[in-house]
Amino acid sequence: MFDYESILQTLSMIDNQKLDIRTITMGISLLDCADSDPDRACGKIYQKIIRKAGKLVEVGEAIERDFGIPIIHKRISVTPISLVAAASGAKDYVKYAQVLDKAAKEVGVNFIGGFSALVHKGYTVGDEILIRSIPEALAVTDTVCSSVNVGSTRAGINMDAVKEMGEIIVKTARRTADRDSIGCAKLVVFANAVEDNPFMAGAFHGVGEPDCVINVGVSGPGVVMKALESCKGEPFDVVASTVKRTAFQITRMGQLVASEASRRLGVPFGIVDLSLAPTPAVGDSVARILEEIGLEHAGAPGTTAALAMLNDAVKKGGVMASSHVGGLSGAFIPVSEDEGMIEAARIGALTLEKLEAMTCVCSVGLDMIAIPGDTSAATISGIIADEAAIGVINNKTTAVRLVPAIGKKVGDEVSFGGLLGSAPIIAVNPFKCDELVERGGRMPAPIHSMRN
């Protein structure tokens, strides 16, 4: 399956071009942990996570040693807690977040996702309680990540949820203001959320998934960047072919690691997410790829076209390399997690509006963007609505992960450390959308949702 030359090429990618497995994520169903007594439910949740994921970090580290492939994070995703906790009659779900955090720390993973609710067509009682619990839950935990799905192509957009999530983001920012509002860095608002995404903060274990599964997220912006250096001045046909070949090699490595982790853990292999996921490290940037294609800085005219080509070529190359590609799969543009994006935002090449346009053609959406701390909840809701509309109309996953940094203004910076990185505060359109947000109700699904 792997010839000698391919092995040498992969080793060079790892040693010189920052190729890595960004995450091995174990998905665990907690549906069988539901209980009318919240303490019993939390006990079941803790025991199941320990039982299923107890060897995840150990196996991940062994694969790193045996194959020489860096695995940056080991993570867990669980069934949306709004579904599990609904049977308990609890008045808030902070206790559930705390037991997730405790279990994650016990098994040694970096993050655990699934403090989540799916409300694209309406709320259950459990959804309402979970959403109200988010600010406190993210303030008192370290590893827990939260997501809320407010729209889908088949259902439209729940504008009541959009309004509420603007308010929740502001509350979360204020509750973690002493840490640059880091709680918001662990909170994503989705449209068309997927069930098998291994990346945080939006990972949760969907109800259509097995009891336990291994999903892998690969990376490799540095590898693509290096490959493109060999085709300076070449037409886009050559550029696209080069990206496809490179994406194939990256995804094959992900397939190898996923299959091996599945075998060693005795857990079914789910998917490889072939996204280009950047880091704050120099040489590991999607923005720098766009510059190599021909832009002075990410955000310049032509950025959206270049990103569209890159995203498409990554998918075309990746799907040939694995029989089970899933998750989000494409190019991520999280501002604080990409050193090229950080620089572009600092000098004003990237604006919120340009980033929104870029999300039409790549994975996820407005991701890890720091905005002034006095931005109103209604304005944030309007931004969420715009991004959800892009996803719903175009039948793709979109998301918003904004950080209104309390006490910070345009030109200031926030710093979260690790893969979350740092970011300058960028300007938000000052004109109001309060009346639009206050309408509530549900924006109808687009006509192309009627495909049965």
Image (tube, grey):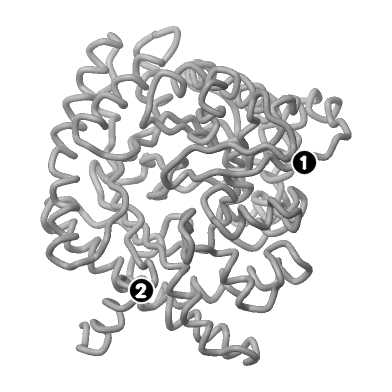
Contact (Cβ within 8 Å) of mark 1 with mark 2: no
Q: Residue at x 60, y 33 (%)?
A: 121
Q: Residue at x 76, y 53 (%)?
A: 348
- For label 2, count other residues whose C-alpha is less than 10 Å away and answer few (under 14), some (14-19) or many (20+): few
Residue 141 sits in which quadrant? Answer: top left
Residue underneath mark 2 = 16
The amino acid type, in three-letter code, at marker 2 is: Asn
Q: Earlier in the sequence, mark 1 or mark 2?
A: 2
Residue underneath mark 1 = 427
**Residue occupying the far right of the picture:** 431
- Dividing the image into 4 quarters, which one contains the N terminus? bottom left
Toward the viewer: 217 or 415? 415
The amino acid type, in three-letter code, at marker 1 is: Ala
- For label 1, count other residues whose C-alpha is less than 10 Å away and answer few (under 14), some (14-19) or many (20+): some
Q: Horizontally, is 264 left or right of 417 in the view?
A: left
Q: Which label number is shown at residue 187? A: none
Q: Secondary structure at mark 1?
A: loop
Q: Position of residue 131 (x, y in %)?
A: 53, 22
Toward the viewer: 30 or 262? 262
Q: Horizontally, is 389 left or right of 397 in the view?
A: right
Residue 261 sits in which quadrant? Answer: bottom left
Q: Secondary structure at mark 2?
A: helix
Q: Residue at x 53, y 21 (%)?
A: 178
Q: Position of residue 64 (x, y in %)?
A: 19, 60
Indicate whether 377 appears above or below 111: above
- Of badges 1 and 2, the one in the foreground is 2
Give the Cα distance between marks 1 and 2.
36 Å
Q: Position of residue 146 (x, y in %)?
A: 46, 32
Q: How many marks?
A: 2
